[in-house]
Amino acid sequence: MDSLVVARLFRQLATHRFCHDGAALPSATIWQQRRMQSSKSRQNVKTTVESSWQQRTDSFPQDKAEEFKKYPNVTADGLRGRRERPRRVKMLMRDFIEDSLYNPQYGYFSKHATIFTAAPFDFNSIKDEPEFNRLLGQRYVEFEDKLDEKEYDDARQLWHTPTELFRPYYGEAIARYMVANYKLSLYPYHDLVIYELGAGNGTLMLNILDYIRQTDAEVYARTKFRIIEVSSSLAKLQTQNLYSSAASRGHADKVEIINKSIFDWDLYVPTPCFFLAMEVFDNFGHDVIRYDPRTDAPMQGSVLIDAEGDFFEFYTRTLDPVASRFLRVRDAACEDRHYSHPLRNSRLWRSIRHNLPFAPNLTLPEYIPTRLMQFFSILGSKFPAHRLVTSDFHTLPQATAGYNAPVVQTRYQRRTVLVRTPLVFQGYFDILFPTDFGVMEDIYRAITGRLTRVMTHEDFFRRWAYVEDTQMRSGENAMLGWYKNASVMVTVVRGNDRGYKSRWYSPPENLETSV
């Protein structure tokens, strides 16, 4: 059943113009063109809204108001045990995105994503960036050729990360940052405890542990590394890579791989720890909000999936508690910060624009990172002495329409295909969002009570990497030159490492304690 739908989907996509030719790689500014698109991929997406709130994105959208009233609400958590993609249901946008990406049976990361890996590059012997791009493209082809020898797949979802491209130097720089800060304020009174969220192949873990073992035996003796991985297949791959060689097996007593969602975390960890979240914010579920241009009232988006598996977008005036809390926290935490928003234009201009013939009756969508807010709440309540180290995109080109809107893409016959909606066939499309680090920094501080510092990807690695390791003969530096659209945010310790209490922070009650 699934294979027939997928075959039809990708035949239709093949008639569209591709973003890249042949084996060409994604642009460095987009990062790794990581992930992908719809139930029935279509150029014109049918959308409706509750009652008179109909989005005029099609000339003749189908009326699904009756189905919206009678279909049951479901959540991503409630769909985890389902083997088939749901029909005749409705759910919030954040649940639709999370189900599409993380469902254990058909989710993108659970079943369809493959992470590119290859032997480390000898950057010092590479002439310049064009030669590096050529070598990378060649290795991509070789890597996928080997996969095709085992099992051919037209729709293989293959992407790369900076950890893999710049190993081991990327991981060594992060290790250097953690060891320096650990020895400055925690050693010898605490162990070096590291949590990593979403560890991919496990390469970053191995690079970090290798570096600490080689450079500081005393710190290595007190190091513990714990991976929190929602994908069972990736957790299995991480375990395989941990035991793949004698050198990596030497770390086995330091490592624990916990196969669960961070949003299911129920243990209280009172001791200081570093918490790595590298390139994971972009795939957290987001809610979608549109505003009434006349009253400025927010309306929250839901996705209806009908009996045929087609998607329809509805908006209601009642916000769920999570979205309502996000808007409330953002208003309080970011009151002095200017950020992009559908209501930034004057009300008079909005009134004129929306009174024009055929104008939409709601603003452009705004995607709000509600799951990221919940992640910050977990850090604040379950890991009160944590130090966050995170990197992600602050901007993404070729995004869908709206504010803080995602890039949605798939891969077919080794080519990247961009689409214009996040309402896509679950499991075969990457849905990745930019992170407004200014706003997120304020929200993180408000929820956890901890201070932060945000810097560019280049600034962080210029300070903590041995930049000569990734410098090419031309003087260009791959690790510094790529990922110009990425930022790094770290927790800054002030006084007591447990941080000061925030008005948004509530201490946990009756929680089981992890030693």
Image (cartoon, grey):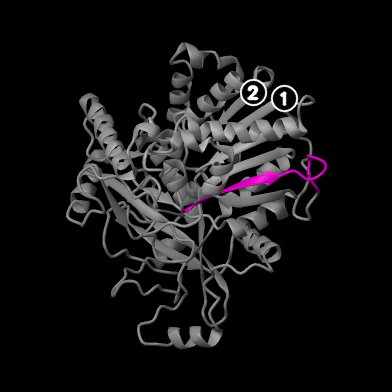
**Magenta stretch: includes residue 255:** no
Start-end of magenta stretch: 485-500
Q: Which mark is residue 347?
A: none
* Residue 248: x %, y % from top left: 50, 17
Above or below, 489 relative to 336: above
Say which residue appears at 70% left-offset and 62% top-offset: 333
Is residue 68 visible to us here? yes
* Residue 317: x %, y % from top left: 55, 70
Horizontal arrangement in the rendering, residue 95 relative to residue 64 (left or right):
right
Give amino acid for label 1. Asp
Horizontal arrangement in the rendering, residue 12 relative to residue 376 (left or right):
left
Instruction: Report if the CB atoms under discs 2 and 1 are less than 8 Å apart.
Output: yes
Question: Which secondary structure, mark 2?
Answer: strand
| Residue bearing the label numbered 2 | 224
Give amino acid for label 2. Lys
| Residue bearing the label numbered 1 | 191
